Amino acid sequence: MVETSALKMLGRQMECGPEMAVEMAAEWLRVRDREGRLQPLVANAAQRRFEEQRGRQNIVLKARQMGVTTWVAGRFFLRTITKPGTLTLQVAHTREAAEGIFRIVQRMWEELPKDMREGPLVRSRANAGQMVFPELDSEYRVASACDIGAGRGMSLQNLHCSEVSRWPGDAAMTLAGLRAALAPGGELVLESTPNGAYGAFYVEWCAGVEAGGDRNAMVRHFLPWWMEASYVGPRVDAAAMTEVEAALVERHGLSEKQIGFRRGLERSYGGLRSQEFAEDAETCFRATGSCFFNIGAIERQLGEYEEIVATRRGEALLVWLPPQEGRKYLVAVDSAGGGEDGDFAAVQVIDRLTGLQCAELQERLRPSELAKVAVELAKEYHGAMIAVERNNHGAAVLAYIETSEHYTTVYRQGSEAGWLTTAVSKPEMTARLGSLLEQRPEIFKSKRLLSECRTFVGRERGKTGAANGAHDDLVMAMAVAQAVREEMLPRSHGTWADGIR
């Protein structure tokens, strides 16, 4: 294996700490700046802070165009060409973004000395997403989260996942597959701008630890927009600043020109300013995305402790309130096809008068199994009425309930058994559930349900549903339960809201 003395020295220097890594990047790597000029990769404030605080696993919450992707690409590229046997993978949220990252790395290679490019760093393959260095047995790849099986079968030393909050499909599953390919001791970087208080990136951020803690845990790095030196605008006099602007100056030492830039953001981005140019690691999530329900109400209730008095079926079935004498109950069922990789079936048991959540089932069950479990719960809760969403597999569940389980206390719409969710009824159901979450959040006991509420999002043309990679079976089962309950409330109790007082 051929190596130049310069590469050997560079490899040793890269391991000498953040200051040396910053020096080596400036000496060896070239990138294009915002004006398109070729310049040394001199670390800006955000890049330097990340380098100083990074651990083995990192998650970066950032404002737009802070240079994190370029910095990580440069560091991983230097590692790839100085450590034989290194496999590096960067995964972007779209194919176009992946191609852009690859062009950055391609330029870094092109700007290296000719004797390196034609010597130990000669490439046997260099296409739109892959560089292979046969003399080093090393490889640099760039892929898209859209690519099925990205990272499978590899043993990665370096993994960078870019704009994770915007990954398509089941982002959590894609990330799990990539993590499985990362070798023990390999470095991981997840980074993104915020995109709502839900999804794989938000979950990973909440599970991370602050920089300076356990360096083997997921280290959090928050990089607000004012760390970028070019983000300045017209000067705003201190006397003309709002209370919020003055507080930012006091707390973070912002300049009058940075306040001017911030005002420009408000004019250009409106409500998206907090998403694209984050200022706070908490409110930037809540102010962004498209969660259908009130995030604040959900998170407050998530923070409350609700005692589970019984678990069954391997914790698929949770019980908070056992049946009480003299109470009437409702069992709502959201069906699924079942199978190992299918959607979950869900059952919600509520008190018919108060709407209080008593028990919940979330399990992958075939229609016949789901019918049996639903009937068992209904019998346990004093012969409760069963309301099955009859869409899709629901018709089969109803058939099993009536013919195999011989249970007759079944909710009907006219002559038809079951509840039908339509383009007309769904907005009403979800709006009712949203009002309950705000007005009486204490009636909801399940963390699983509340977590699904957090990932239940609005879409185009007024449609709603689970965010990519999330589920809404528990949400829909509860929405059915509360809708049927309203119909069944005695008129003496007035509206559904009156009935829970």
Image (cartoon, rainbow, N blue to C red):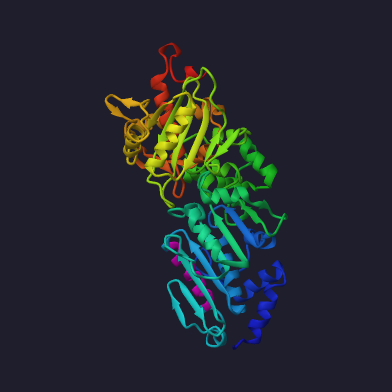
Residue displayed at 62% across by 40% down: 245
In the figure, is residue 80 to the left or right of 347?
Answer: right
Tell me the quarter of the image containing the N terminus.
Answer: bottom right
The quarter holding residue 129 reads bottom left
Indicate the quadrant where residue 416 lies.
top left
Q: Is residue 329 left or right of residue 50?
A: left
Residue 285 is left or right of residue 208, and the answer is: left
Q: Is residue 354 above or below residue 270?
A: above
Above-or-below relation of 322 to 498: below
Depth check: give the residue in front, 382 or 68.
382
Nearest to the observer: residue 162 or residue 477: 477
**Would residue 468 be seen by someone viewing this image from the given angle?**
yes
Name which residue lies at 63% across and 72% down. 25
- How far from the left and from the top, in percent, is residue 453? 49, 38
- The one nearer the camera, 75 or 169, is 169
The x, y position of residue 99, in whole percent, is 44, 67
Judged by its main secondary structure, the magenta piece is helix
Residue 264 visible in this rendered orientation of the protein: no
Q: Is residue 18 left or right of residue 90?
A: right
Residue at point 72%, 54% (across, down):
213
Q: Which residue is situated farthest in the top direction here? A: 492
Numbered range of the magenta stretch: 96-109
